[in-house]
Every structure is written in C-alpha cells, then in structure tokens.
Image (tube, helix red, strand yellow):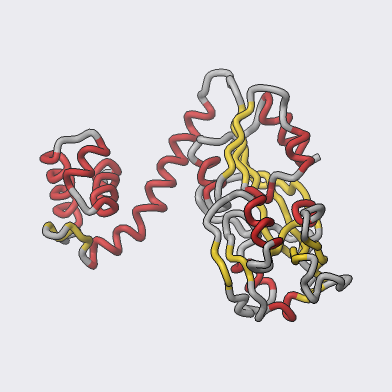
Amino acid sequence: MDPHLLRTYVTVARLASFSEAARELGYTQSAVSQHIQALEQDLGAPLLTRRPVLPTAAGERLLEHAGPLLLRLDAARADVVRMAAAPEHGLTLAAAPTALGAHVLAALPAAGVTLRVLVREAVPVAVATGTADLGLVDGLAAPSDPLRLPDVAPLTTRGAGEEPVCVLLPDAHPLARRPGLRLADLADARWLDAPDAGLPLTHLRAANGGHVFRPALRYDGTDVRTLTALAAAGRGLTLLPRSAATGIPGTVAVPVTEPRVVHRTELVHAGALRGAAAALADALTG
C-alpha cells in the first residue's frame, strides 16, 4: 500500500470529513477523494461510507494496522536521518512526569536542553520518530526486572534507577500511622485515577493479581503537584515513587511492603549516541 494514500485515509477517518482532511493535509478535496478511491481499488473493498463519512468494517480493520505501520515508517525515516544528520545543535529529552526525579534534573546540561513532559506511551514514540533524542519512561516492576515497553521501533533501553513506592495518604487518614501497607488491603479504597501523572491503576492491578482498585476521581493531566494536592484533600489515594511522595504538606507517604515492587526508570534511545546526548545518558545511567 502507498503510505501517502494510507495517511490520507487515516486523516479522513479521524476527522470524518473529506474537506477537513484536505485542509489539514494541504490537498484539494478532489485529490483526497482520488486517494481514497485509489486505496479502495488497491484493496478491493470500500473503506468509507460517504454520508456520513465513517469507516466500513474493512476500513475499521485497516485502521487497526495503519497506526503501527505509519509509526514504523516515521521511525525508519527518523533513524536514517539521525545517522546522516548534521552536528547536533541541542538536546531534547522526553520524560514521563514521575521519571523526573531530582537526580535527573541535576544531570541536565546547563544550556541547550529542551525538556518535554509527555504521557508514558508517548515517550518511546517521540524517541522513535526523532522528536526527542532521549526518553525516560517509568513504571512498577519487580526489583531489577525491566519495564514492558510498547514495540514501536528498535530502541535501546538502559536502567536509570529504582526506588521504593509509597501510598500517599492525607495525614488524618486512619492508615497514615502504619509503618507499611499491603496493596491487597487497599483494593477497595477510594483511588485517584491519574494515569499520566502518577503510577496508573492498571499497574497496581497487574502487580497485585488483578484486584479492582476502583477510581473515585480521574485526573487527566501530567502535573504531579495537582495529583498530590488532590490526595492531600482526601479525594483519593495515589501511588508514587518515594521521592515524589515525601514532604507533601498535609500528607503521609506510607511504603508499600507487599507485593515487592519498585518504581523503575529506564532510558530509551535510538541508534548510537554522541555529544551531549551521550554525556547525559551516561550521567543518568552510570
């Protein structure tokens, strides 16, 4: 399949409009229609209904393949360009919010750095597609176990640190004076669902045998301070690396004692590193 036609199709399906897709892609509406027709002829199946503009069953199946295919094409282009690139003029680090510990901030060069705080799933994509030189991803893992990262492209991963995890509680919470907590005992508690700011509830469920961990409030954002303020206000519990959970006014950070899990951070990059990127990678993983 011609990737240009595939990109056009994905854009039309996402916007549900030929005219909007033409504006976004910089084509005429006629050209967009011709792209869709050519792709449908190539595959021998209608992909879109026209009024309204919606994917057919065959079109839905193609969309399942299209995202990974186009991502790998972007990653391949970025990888080749990276090898033939001119000398670097700066450094871009993409990181999940809770991967930005004090040691990371201290290791950043004094100048020439762009720091991009992204949702976890977007960090490997940014590195693979060349919009970031380095990435920092994090999550729950058994001690010394690697993280499970999405297979977006051939990327190199290096361990960048592990630390204990804590449940953040309001200081008046009945469990706030405990020396440690078992996640299984908190499965029915009120939790904050903040997948892009704290450690996602899906990680808790996976680490603790699939217990439900029902959310009381969902926070769609990447600001860890907002998340800790919600916990301090009693809106729900949250799980954080110890460094991010300690010293928050009005709260107590109680260590998780069971199961044996840690907050793990990994550095991801594509290809061989040089210059400032290599120096930062060594500082973060040494």
Q: Does residue 241 appear to the left or right of 24 in the view shown?
A: right
Q: Is residue 236 above or below residue 105?
A: below
* Of the pair 170 and 129, the residue shown nearer to us: 170
Question: At 74% across and 61% down in the image, what residue appears?
Answer: 145
Locate residue 278, reporting x and y percent: 70, 30
Residue at 25%, 54% in the rendered image? 13
Foreground residue among 236 and 108: 236
Residue 122 image offset from top left, x and y in percent: 52, 48
Residue at horizontal 55 percent and vertical 52 percent from the top:
221
The residue sitting at the right extreme is: 179
x then y, percent, for residue 45: 16, 61
- Rendered location of residue 150, percent (x, y): 54, 56
Using the image, determine if residue 188 lies above or below residue 56.
Answer: below
Whether residue 119 sits left or right of residue 14 in the image: it is right
| Depicted 251 relative to depicted 15: above or below | below
Q: Quadrant of the C terminus?
A: top right
